[in-house]
Image (spheres, helix red, strand yellow):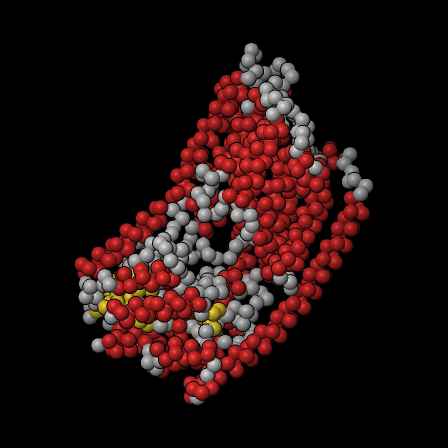
Amino acid sequence: MPSGATMLRSDRRKKPSSPAKNGFRLDIQGLRAFAVIVVILDHLLGWPSGGFVGVDIFFVISGFLITGHLMREWEKTGKISFWNFYKGRIKRILPAATLVLAVTVGASFLLLNKSRAMSVLWDGVWATLFSGNWRFASTGTDYFQADGPVSPLQHFWSLAVEEQFYFVWPWLMLLALILVGRSQSAKIRPRIIVGLLIGAISAASFAWAMFETIASPTMAYFSTFSRAWELGLGALLAVASPLMLKISNGIRPALAWIGIAGMVASVFVISSSMAFPAPTALLPVLSTVLVIASGIGGEQKYLAPLTNPGSAYIGNISYSLYLWHFPVIILLGPLLPWEGVLSLLVQVVIMVLAAVIAYHLWEDTIRKSPWLNGTTAWKSFKLPTWYRDASLGALAILTVSVIGITMLVSNNQQARMNSEARAAEAIATKLDESKKSAESPTNESASLVVEKDRMAETASLTAGSEAKAVIAEVEKALTMTSWGTAEKAMSEAAGGKSTPALGSCGNEAAAISQCFTGPENASKTVVLTGDSISISWLSALNPILDELDWRLHIRGRFGCPFVGAEKVFDSEKDAQSCAEHKASVLDYIKTEKPDLVLIANTAAIPKLKGEGSKESLWVKGVENYLGKMGNSQAIILTPAPADKNMSRCFTANSSPVACQGEQTAEWTNITAGERKAAQKSGALFVDSSPLFCAINLCPAVINEIPVKHDASHITQEYGEYISPALAEMIQVAIAKKN
């Protein structure tokens, strides 16, 4: 944009009426330090519970500083140079962001599986376009990606919100200032108009945030429209800064400390379970406003926690520190050979070193350089005398760090491989012992007795040749120590490419009349219901519908388990939708009287409403619904045990042993309770676990086929592979009942 793109109003030049100081405010640097520290603690430790409000503090600071700068420029020169404004934003934002994006994407291709690395690459593209918040909002609301691996670039969402705000806000200020003119008699008039404008925008944004927080919490968290009010309140404070001059110096420290207390309280009182960002974010936002307001036009006294040299320096590097901390936690943290406090300390040291080096040698140097100032400015530009020595020192630190980390990771990987090889041998031995114990009861250990009892209950279901063939492959897979030829398929599964093609069935918008599959003239009508697990079973059911002579009506719903217990949802809208769906399915069963009702729910029990353990609430809910089947025969089909998330577990350095899951105590208790409920009500119970696990261990790949693409949902390919075995088991269960 040419430098002539300015807003001219008056040729008169007067002293600006703004009392806002152009000087450096240590208290604001201290606020930045506090904000970045609590964000890092939240991401690193999950403590304090409201550490994520540090981002809200950043929003207020940004809105205040940027708007104050624009207002002072207008009052001093009678114009606002868009070129200078956006040039300043580019020099402030792009150098550090570009460096972190490039390093993170490159590291992702070295450390992660190809599919996940490609996803990070696309995250980087969206972040470069300052649109990352919309990408993360959409993937967060996508059911099959919501519990997927966290992107090392997810924290760029807040940067996107800020820059989207500043793509629009200066132009709205221009419109307001053009309309009002630069008054000759009342200098405050432009501020009133701009204040009314930003007040209206902030009020509208807050109202929208209140609505969207209830309707769609994930979207509300990332949405610019739901966050604009936070930047807006900072902007409103900047516009109202002349009024802050009237604050008595005697009460300024008290106001500041009230604000500090509010910020500290917010990080401990607020949690992710609360309605956020509205109205809960009001506490940290208004607290930040108080601290900033207390320092406008007055000295920041008695604020040592914010104004000390340490806080000031952390505030200086806070932007770089914010950008570097998350890739270090997500990419490097899992590779470190240590656990606990030592691992956390190493991660902190690495992120701080990266931030310090990047700030002094890259971010701040480019910001102070003549870049974007024209070719003439470069002629007189010289790097500081310390720059070469500091660069060499940084290079030495970087080299030693890379070599050291590489050696540590390599040694750790070798130790892990040796450990996993021993684990595979132990598993093979345990499998042999399990088989021998079946023939020699006196040799049984307590754990093998439990396993034998569980297998005995399903022995008749798995007596067929197809089921036995799958079970043999399961046992074989448990002793694998390398991915071999399955590596490519695992990469595709981890990237979600093996997710079953479901169409709209399972979504709220599904047309009930269209969700049928199987032969139209089948002798049996079957309703398939449950949550997303029921939908994922379609890959195994579709190939055998002709053999079973079933006409299948798909009535599952993502995130809505078919049990007579109330799941706790993030929004009332989702809770109501699920309740209405379950009532609709029950009414359909009562009215249409299908021959069979096939129920398949999650293996990871969600939080439920009511008193008692969630296991007991769940089993009671199963009993409740089984009692409402009328003349229809119910069949409970157990899910694959949920444990390791393949999209996270599978990396460039992982192994099959490391990605093995387990039949957890929760899964065992739930299936045992469901089995009793089925026996009590006369329902059939098909335990599918032998198709996934042996001796309580569940391999990630069986017969070179990835089993799941996340923690719970089977892949299309594995569903098709076990389809004949599943047909055998269902037919045996029905025959036994008849």
- Is residue 703 at all visible to an observer of this figure? no
Instruction: Give me the residue at 25% from left, 54% from top.
Output: 584
Instruction: Give me the residue at 49% from left, 39% from top.
Output: 281
- Is residue 303 at all visible to an observer of this figure? yes
Q: Left or right of 346: which side holds 610?
A: left
Residue 94 is situated, as x and y percent measured from the top left of the image, at: 62, 42
Residue 542 is situated, as x and y percent measured from the top left of the image, at: 32, 68
Q: Is residue 300 above or below residue 115?
A: above
Quadrant that contains the C terminus = bottom left
Residue 49 is situated, as x and y percent measured from the top left of the image, at: 53, 48
Residue 321 vs residue 512, the one in the foreground:
321
Instruction: Give me the residue at 64% from left, 15% from top.
Output: 14
How many marks can you see? Answer: 0
Q: Left or right of 738: which side holds 300?
A: right
Q: Is residue 183 above or below residue 701?
A: above
Residue 650 vs residue 101, the one in the foreground:
650
Quadrant that contains the N terminus = top right
Q: Is residue 374 above or below residue 45?
A: above
Q: Left or right of 621: which side holds 148?
A: right
Q: Is residue 465 above or below residue 196?
A: below
Residue 177 is situated, as x and y percent measured from the top left of the image, at: 52, 21
Q: Quadrant of residue 532?
A: bottom left
Q: Quadrant of residue 407?
A: bottom right
Instruction: Give me the residue at 61% from left, 18% from top.
Output: 17
Residue lying at the far front of the rendered structure:
612
Q: Quadrant of residue 420?
A: bottom right
